[in-house]
Amino acid sequence: MSRIRSVCVYCGSGPGNDPAYVEAAEQFGRELAKNDVRLVYGGGKVGIMGAVSRAVIDHGGQVTGIIPEFLMEREHARKAGNGLIVTHDMHQRKRKMFQMADAFVALPGGVGTLEEIVEQITWAQLGRHRKPILLANINKFWDPLCALFEHMKSLQFIRRGLEFDLLLADKADDILPKLQAAAAAIPEEAKQMQTADTERL
């Protein structure tokens, strides 16, 4: 697989109550811009979403926001920057995000963030793609989810044939190097899910 050129970031539309979350988002945004990696994200300019996208733009990087029509006002769609794609619904948004991304990162966030990253894990588990997936475990935010996965494994709900690769990074600086290392081991043809397949999911 060629080097990662775009990363889809799932994250909260709120900032959370730990300043470390916004700081990590800003640092990761700077790293994306520095390494000429496009940010693909939910299109809002508030919360963690706003922090990561603003950092990319402020440091000369490329940003594509993808947002459904009904969230334009609620999440204060970022119209400034490099591009905003408005979709009809959440399903179309997620398909477009998948198609534009070489890898997926979950920064801290709420139920929507959880749902989006778990969907990518599920698609990988079912053999639909092999794009790298990483949890940005800032201040151990994702520890409960990792514990749940281990619980599922112990009860054999995640069993042989249903394993999946999941990366973890405790610091923002470690995210992109881990994604690049994982991507280097994946053949180009193995990373792609055909557009027709995304339409069926």
Image (cartoon, rainbow, N blue to C red):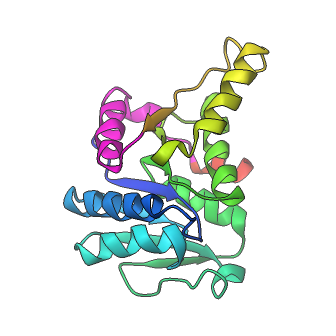
116 shown above or below 1: below
Instruction: Name the image quarter holding residue 3.
Output: top left
Query: Which residue is nearer to you in this view: 73 or 16?
Result: 16
Quadrant (top left/top right/bottom left/bottom right) for the N terminus: top left
127 shown above or below 172: above
Instruction: Name the image quarter holding residue 187.
Output: top left
Query: Is residue 179 within the magenta segment?
Result: yes
Query: Is residue 200 within the magenta segment?
Result: no
Magenta-highlighted residues: 170-194
With 140 as the anchor, is 32 left or right in this view? Answer: left
Give the residue displayed 29% in from the left and 47% down from the top: 173
Give the residue displayed 72% in from the left and 82% down from the top: 70
Query: Which residue is nearer to you in this view: 126 or 179?
Result: 179
Majority secondary structure in the magenta region: helix
Measured as percent of width and height from the top left, residue 71 is found at 67, 80
Instruction: Name the image quarter holding residue 94.
Output: bottom right
Give the residue displayed 55% in from the left and 60% down from the top: 11
Measured as percent of width and height from the top left, residue 184 is found at 30, 31
Count every numbered label the image shows and give the total: 0
Name of the residue lying farthest toward the top: 160
154 shown above or below 140: above
Name of the residue lying farthest toward the front: 18
With 27 as the anchor, is 161 left or right in this view? Answer: right
Examine the rendering and report whether any part of residue 126 can be seen.
no
Examine the rendering and report whether any part of residue 189 can be seen.
yes
Give the residue displayed 59% in from the left and 37% down from the top: 143
Measured as percent of width and height from the top left, residue 47 is found at 53, 73
Measured as percent of width and height from the top left, residue 172 is found at 35, 50
With 92 as the anchor, is 134 left or right in this view? Answer: left
